[in-house]
Amino acid sequence: MIAHLLVRTAAFALGAALASHAAAQEARTVLPLASDWRFTGEDAPSDAAKPDFADDAWQAVSVPHTWNRVGYYHHDLGGTNTAATVAKKMGVGWYRHRFDAPANLAGRKTWIEFDAASRVAQVWLNGVLLGEHRGGFGRFRLDASAALKPGQSNVLAVRVDNSQPAAGSSTSDVLPLFGDFFVHGGLYRPVRLISTAPLHVDMQDFGGPGLYANTAAVQGGDAQVHVRLRLTNDGAKAAAASARIALIDRDGKVAAQATVKQALGVKATQEVAADLTVPGAHLWQGVVDPYLYRLRAEVLGADGKVSDTVEQNFGIRTMRFDADKGFFLNDKPYVLHGVGYHQDRDGKGWAISPADVEEDVATMREMGVNSIRLTHYQHGQVIHDLADRYGFVLWDEVPLVSAWTMMGKMEPDPALVANVRQQLSELIHQNYNHAATAIWSIANEVDFGNSLPAFVRGGTDGKTPDPMPLLHELQALAKAQDPSRPTALATCCEGRLFGADVAIPETAVAADLGGANRYFGWYFGKEQDLGPALDQLHAKRPAQPLSVTEYGAGGALTIHTDNVLGGAPDSRGAAQPEEYESYIHETALAQIAARPYLYASWLWNSFDFATTVRTEGDAQDINTKGLVAYDHKTRKDAWYFYKANWSDAPTIRITGRRYATRAYGITDVKVYSNAQSTELLLNGRSLGKREGCAQMVCVWPAVTLDAGENRLVARGIRHGAAVEDQITWTLSPEKRGHIAIDTGALVAAKSKTRLLGSDNWFEGGEVASLDKPADYGRKAELARIEGTQERDAIATYRKGDFAYHIPAPAGRYKLTLWFPAVAGQAKGGFDVRANGKSILRAFEPAAPAADAAAVARSFDVTSKGQIDLEFKAGAAPARISLIELDAQ
């Protein structure tokens, strides 16, 4: 029976509190097990668990550790991994560690605590099997009391297996089964030995602290805090225990306290509870004022001595989600704008340090982030503690991603259901006390239906399992374990336009809150489709709060475009320019900000991350949608777009600095600026000022660059502080008189003989290609094109009825038009006019005998500052692959 006591605030002397805290520190000891480990990346013989096993030949490592290094760029701008240094092996690794146990641990309880081991771990101490943990993300503890040798040397052995799940494999029932991220192996979070007295706070409650609190109510300035404490008696006799529970403010003063008594039988665990009333409670107010108390529970025996203590940071706050008005923190509207976050980084994989996470959080704070979606698995305590401290609101997620059965099965195996239940329980118990944690997510993108992507497809004979039974079970489990927080899940596919043969399950109804992963303008649709799609979801379920849980685009540091509308991006291939990523975020944020019913938005992603299902952009095995590169230092232009919009700090960023060698002598200059007025200078000449720029995006159109070096400086003042940015572009002298437009191309083709620019200065038409694009697991199929050394440029083209208005300095030019001709093409011609005069009538590029060919025609034209070309369809659509202008 739960003992329950309501106690108003009582003040006891600070000295007594400190004394009792000191006693508790003696009652519980923690021994970090970080250095002097031995590791082998192979499966060792069965006697590797024995204390006398010879491990001298194994590698000396420290923990945290992972054997994996995944993902690299084809350049040196954003990371140190290379093709030679990556290590993608998935399978078994072994760790061994010798440590001396203090003699005073005799007669006490001891546990080996792992903050994570990926993804299945078996643990031996002194040759005794302590147990196994299945799941790569949650903390777990194994009772080492019987195997430990106090006052002697001890040997800890751990076998870890991060094999990719497959039917019949050792990890077939351990989530995630699949995912667009790499699951690193190893002991990638800290390990420690914990010792307590026999009478202690429960250590075997899904890795949780055994102490749990939530804000029950805030009214009239006072707060009601409900506290639960799990007490365990591992002694040989029954115990008369009491628990002293207190909230301590930042000044060390007791804000509220209660004492609860509980009799405990032998080897018994009992939960007790108390309600604390905190007068004049100082609330946790997000990034504005993330005030934290210390929640302390002391366990006392019948003699009144403290036998154990647990402390947790705790923030008093209320949160609610409204389907029409969004998110409320402490009953006040609070706009959540955030990022998705993966825990790996270049050169370290998942074995990151607290300093690494602190750096990531600092990068987010500087950008103006106030919320993080912790995807797609349980993250460590460091990020949670930092979120509490800095006021981030968190979405926590269980690793149910895309698939929940092995290939061909219509129902999940019971062992897999048990595993996801275990991982959800660990997620909730271990993060229950964090003020930052707002949402428990029970799944991500389990609504593909029969449109499964290639990396999870196969063996289903067109049938797909129903996710709803499992989602309903997880919903019930989450609400039972924490009724104070809402559940959510993220969907990918509902509301999109698919073929008639595609069936998409409606999964959003399984959770309290909705979340939409939508990549309009990238994987599907048009960039302006996002807002209307969200409106449709909101109208369909008007009572369910809705958020945007993912949106974005790839952004390659070394790939650039002159016009983001000049061609189609290639979400599976190379055409992923940095400028297009910025464009998608600019258009998406405008649509999101215009919809106050959204309770949150999380862009995808804060940092580039490793995934072995991608070969795209300028990288291998990296998802390049991050706003910061894989080194977690190199910031892309889009990062500054959000900083200018979300942060109050003075911000100016001239975009396109990595596109330093310019293809065109006339170009728009775009600056992200939150200054009251922004001035742009080119080689010391002012190009004017901009004020009141929409979304903090200031543009100077059609800037004429100088031959040679172009030093651009943008400057302004915000809140009385001057802010400035400068970059240098180079325009080769010959480009002043030569323009080469790779039409239909978002990214200009590479040429050995000329510098091509991407499609620009067009009006109308559609883009097309003779090549078949890449897809997951499939390379692009390149057409064979005769009659040219510019195969890649000829492959893309613009077609239909369209025009070009090309800015060119006054003078005479040679105009060369390159047309694509395709074998078996429909008969028919089209017309071309230059500056209003016909230069081609009913023109029909000759069809080749091969797959395709390039057909060129040249003309003399005159520019008075602009050359106008018109392409008019006749019996066939007009089409053009390459436009060249050479000054005469």
Image: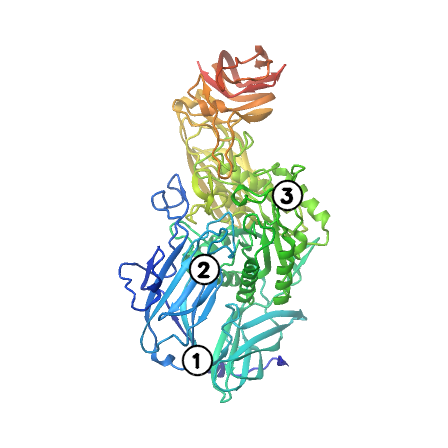
User: In the rendered image, is residue 234 in sight?
Assistant: yes
Which residue was labeled with disc 1? 27
Counting residues from the start of the chain, the first of labels 1 and 3 encountered is: 1
Dot 3 falls on a residue whose secondary structure is: helix
Q: Nearer the viewer, residue 676 or 831?
A: 831
* Mark 2 burial class by Cα count in 10 Å: few <14, some 14-19, many 20+: many
Kind of residue sitting beneath label 1: Ala
At x 44% / y 20%, what residue is drawn? 738
At x 44% / y 13%, what residue is drawn? 888
3D distance between C-alphas at marks 1 and 2: 32 Å
Which residue was labeled with disc 2? 120
Where 66 falls versus 801 (above or below)? below
Q: Quadrant of residue 438?
A: bottom right
Query: Which residue reaches farthest bottom?
Result: 303
Where is residue 748 shown, x and y percent of the image? 47, 28
Label pair 1/2, CB-CB below 8 angstroms: no
3D distance between C-alphas at marks 1 and 3: 56 Å
Kind of residue sitting beneath label 3: Gln
Dot 1 falls on a residue whose secondary structure is: helix
Which residue was labeled with disc 3? 591
